[in-house]
Image (spheres, rainbow, N blue to C red):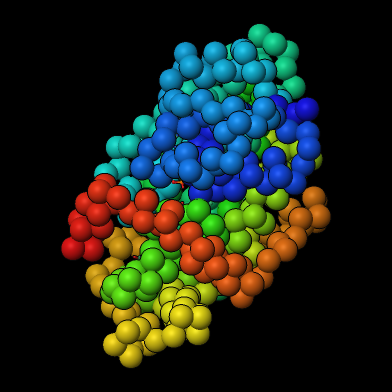
Amino acid sequence: MKTVLVTGGLGFIGSNFIRLLLNDFSDYHIINLDAVTYAGNPENLKEFTADSRYLFAHGDIGDRELVDKLLQTEKPDFIVNFAAESHVDRSITGPAAFIETNIVGTFTMLEAFRNYCGENDSKCRFLQVSTDEVYGSLGAEGYFLETTPYSPNSPYAASKASADHLVRAYHHTYKLDTLITNCSNNYGPLQFPEKLIPLMISNALEGLALPVYGDGKNVRDWLYVEDHCRALELVMNQAQSGVTYNIGGRNELENIELVKLLCNSLDRRLGLLPDGRARTELIKFVGDRKGHDQRYAIDADKIRKDLGWEPQTNLAQGMEMTIDWYLDNQEWLNQVRDGSYQKYYQEMYG
Ligand code: NAD
Ligand code: DAU
């Protein structure tokens, strides 16, 4: 069995990653360290509660004592660090939590990892799950490569860039076995409805306004979450020490096109709104995000060539699967849109 300490495994990508390792492989034992913030939901992995291959540890990646204890008792072969504050809009209104978790928290994990490797002569690897936002914003042309200079524009992106620099430095200075992946926008089941796709689906189901920032022409490069998770499983097992990989599916779309696609799919499945309007009529252009990055686009040739990774889900299939999931899990949506979500929503969208 390979033991993996996953941090942030109750969130969107972390819970999909744990489900993939436990359902599609037979040789993983998982410890999930999660602080259960507003974005962490025990429901996301409830089917594994009684599974002997899965252990949940409630706690903060910034709690050095706890992390040390987990490393000493569980002796993981891999640490996969997903835990983060992940929403750009929240980083604009309240950056402090992003500095605390994404930078100081990652630093704490690295210090505990350094100590663990030193004391145990361990073969443990540390995979930092990062984002393409560290590279900043593209114009109409070009792609992010692993060699693109970092140029983060939001407090979120800057905090992830800082963490990446620390991870890189720990490899260089202490010769620790670290890896970094920088992935584009994920979508799929279990994404919290503060992010574009689940927010639009959930509002469109309720006949609420669909708030599109600015002119809606910002471009994101979408990847189905399971494809990201498969890439991470490959990287953690097969990548050379110290390597960085970009991960993306070459699925670029303007936000407005994406929102229209979601609306049209919902109209096809559910019929028009009760008042006879198409859901595209719910689209409302609102003020732009501060410092809004124009375009992200990943060149993922390195991971394709080195590790043979290919996304398995195209955008049309992935969107339909995602809409299916939200339609089948409206109880989940209602549960996460609780009091604190309502407060956030009012403050953001008034
Ligand atoms: P998410 O917000 O859905 O989940 C974050 C998880 O981390 C939650 O379960 C939360 O409870 C936990 N957490 C937060 N602070 C913690 C702390 N101090 N200690 C322990 N746990 C803590 O995030 P996500 O979208 O699943 O993203 C996961 C990772 O992937 C993040 O590092 C993010 O930067 C990165 N990433 C996300 C995307 C994307 O499109 N969502 C793309 C590329 C990279
Ligand atoms: O690129 C990877 C990043 O993708 C991850 O690192 C982040 O954790 C993840 O949140 C995501 O960041 P984005 O800012 O790109 O995702 P978000 O879903 O917040 O927004 C996608 C686009 O949609 C962006 O251009 C802003 C726009 N948008 C978003 C919201 C929430 C709207 O137009 N209206 C909205 O209400």
Lateral position of residue 48 relative to residue 160, left or right:
right
Q: Quadrant of residue 31?
A: top right
Q: Is residue 230 above or below residue 266?
A: above
- Point 64% across, 18% down: residue: 74
- Point 30% across, 42% down: residue: 95
**Closer-to-camera residue (318/91):** 318
- Point 59% across, 27% down: residue: 55
State the image coordinates of residue 211 (x, y, percent, origin top left). Answer: 30, 71
The N terminus lies in quadrant: top right
Q: Is residue 52 visible?
A: yes
Q: How many marks?
A: 0
- Ligand 2: give its quadrant: bottom left
Lateral position of residue 157 relative to residue 299, left or right:
left
Lateral position of residue 223 relative to residue 233, left or right:
left
The C terminus lies in quadrant: bottom left
Q: Is residue 134 above or below residue 211?
A: above
Q: Is residue 197 above or below residue 165?
A: below
The residue positioned farthest toward the bottom in the image shown: 276
Q: Is residue 181 visible?
A: no
State the image coordinates of residue 102 (x, y, percent, origin top left). Answer: 43, 36
**Closer-to-camera residue (38/195):** 38
- Point 48% across, 55% down: residue: 191
**Closer-to-camera residue (322/197):** 322
State the image coordinates of residue 329 (x, y, percent, origin top left). Answer: 48, 59
State the image coordinates of residue 344 (x, y, percent, origin top left). Answer: 25, 52
